[in-house]
Image (cartoon, rainbow, N blue to C red):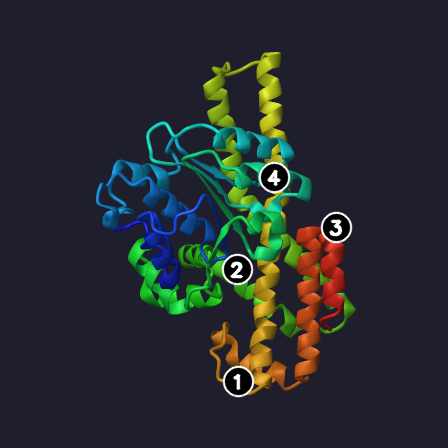
Amino acid sequence: MTVWDDLQGQSAVVAQLQQAATGEGLTHAWLFTGPPGSGRSNAAKAFAAALNCDQDDVSLRGCGECHACRTILGETHADVAFVRTEKVTITIEEARDLVSTAGNRPSSGRWRIIVVEDADRMAERTTNVLLKAIEEPTPRTVWMLCAPSPADVLVTIRSRCRAVALRLPPAADVAALLVKRDGVDPAVAERAARAAQSHVGIARRLARDAEARERRLETVRFPLGLRGITAAVMMADKLVKIATEEANSSNEERDAAEKASLLATLGAPESGTLPPAMRSQVKQLEDDQKRRAKRSVTDSLDRTLTDLLSFYRDVLIIQMGNSVELVNVELRSELEDFAAGSGPEVTLARMDAINKARKRITTTNVAPLLTIEAMAAGLI
């Protein structure tokens, strides 16, 4: 099993990166772009492993079996830094730390590699901190930035990076990956891949969690019960609750484990009041967890609205008489009845209302419930 095996449906990207890993076409800065779920960060991680692979034969780089490949895929290699934020943005202080790290020579591998998974979550002045380091890189350092699209990164940055454009893989490829990698039943894998609209991470969650599948189906069915403003307000409240519960369920166990690990590292007493120095570190962790929780709810709500959008996407396909496969094929009869009640223009307006709500939630500091209520009113 090589480092490229998880990049389903990305044969052109794999060929490009494999060639660069041999030294042909290798440059100091790369920009990985593609829609959510396309595997931007996975592609960057695989490329980092191939660059520092222990194999002497360049044609075998990225073997997935050597110490370097395994530690990079496990994110424990000393020369490869992975940067992701669970807050709203990457701070300027974090960017300065990256520049400092990039200036160090690799300790054991061929390259010092910096993978920034959320390059689109940097303000302009933060990105400018990286500009000089990317413009005039130190020897043996490779930058890998990941973002949804080139437009999400400053032109001064992207003009100095080699582009790697990923696409969403076909649902069949995602299902095959779930079966091969996670041992999921083929029928469940196919339904999860289709419901996730080829987003590998979401498909994996849906395939492994029956409750997540039920929550998604509940979301998708909401438009069927929209009968007036009262129903719209109730739908908005339920959507926010679903997103919040989804985020909290994944955060609670992680938060407790992080706190226990910190207390153990600090040698904290099992009972009684913590010393002031320890209290400040615990307080810092709790503050970070609160910021992460806010980001988690925002991301979860965006996914919930994406599920809702798939309902209207299917309705539009039926109204246009298109032969494209439905996402929510199990609701076909209900979708057909709903589609008969309006025209494509109305459906497009409803889809626009959902997309506007998604943009407000992910890019501005708005109250989620008020935004979703306004959106729901536009769906009546």
Q: Cβ–Cβ below 8 Å for labels 3 and 2? A: no
Considering only order in the chain, which callout, 2 or 4, is on the residue closer to the N terminus? 2
Amino acid under disc 2: Pro
Q: Cβ–Cβ below 8 Å for labels 1 and 3? A: no
Closer to the observer: label 4 or label 3?
Answer: 4
Q: Residue 90 carries which label?
A: 4
Residue 74 as seen in the image, left or right of residue 360: left
Residue 95 image offset from top left, x and y in percent? 58, 35
Q: Name the residue under label 1.
A: 322
Front position in the image: 82 or 101:
101
Quadrant position of the C terminus in the picture: bottom right
Considering only order in the chain, which callout, 3 or 1, is on the residue closer to the N terminus? 1
Give the structural element (helix, strand or loop) at label 1.
loop
Residue 219 seen from this side: no
Give the structural element (helix, strand or loop) at label 2.
loop
Q: Cβ–Cβ below 8 Å for labels 4 and 2? A: no
Distance Cα–Cα, label 4 vs label 3: 22 Å
Residue 220 image offset from top left, x and y in percent? 57, 67
In the image, is residue 247 above or below residue 126?
A: below
Q: Residue 367 carries which label?
A: 3
Amino acid under disc 4: Ile
Residue depicted at 67% across the width and 76% down the height: 348
